[in-house]
Amino acid sequence: MEIVTSWMERGIEQGRDREKALVLHLLDRRLGGVEDRLLDRIRPLPIDDIEALREALLDFETEADLLTWLSQCPASLAE
């Protein structure tokens, strides 16, 4: 049986928040800025999708590449 304390849960959540912040920073650097409407679609993504985006963004050349990726992301479509 796994026991997860509240401080462990908080640490896990902080790690997820930092992962999202890192991906948003990398997108900004890679694309020279990301529109708020796209950030609003990225922020609520589950961590698995954020990790997939982290890998995919290395191949992005334009914001259109990000839009294509988001259009194929099931969690992004649910909104």
Image (tube, helix red, strand yellow):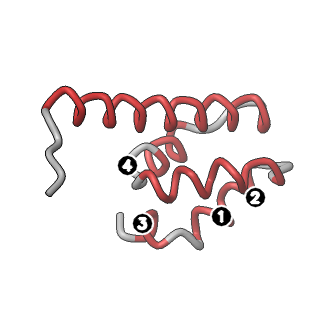
- The vertical placement of 72 against 55, above or below, is below
Residue at image coords 31%, 29% = 11
N-term-proximal mark, 2 vs 4: 4
Residue at image coords 70%, 52% = 55
Residue named by callout 1 = 69
2 vs 4, front mark: 4
Q: Position of residue 63 (x, y in %)?
A: 74, 49
Q: CA distance from mark 4 to mark 1?
A: 15 Å
What SS does tag 2 mark?
Answer: helix
Residues tagged 3 and 1 counted as in contact (Cβ below 8 A): no
For the N terminus, the quadrant is: bottom left
* Residues packed near mark 3 inside 10 Å, few (<14), some (14 to 19) or many (20 plus): some
In the drawing, does residue 34 fall left or right of residue 1?
right
Residue named by callout 4 = 44
Residues tagged 4 and 1 counted as in contact (Cβ below 8 A): no
Residue named by callout 3 = 75
* Quarter of image, res 8: top left
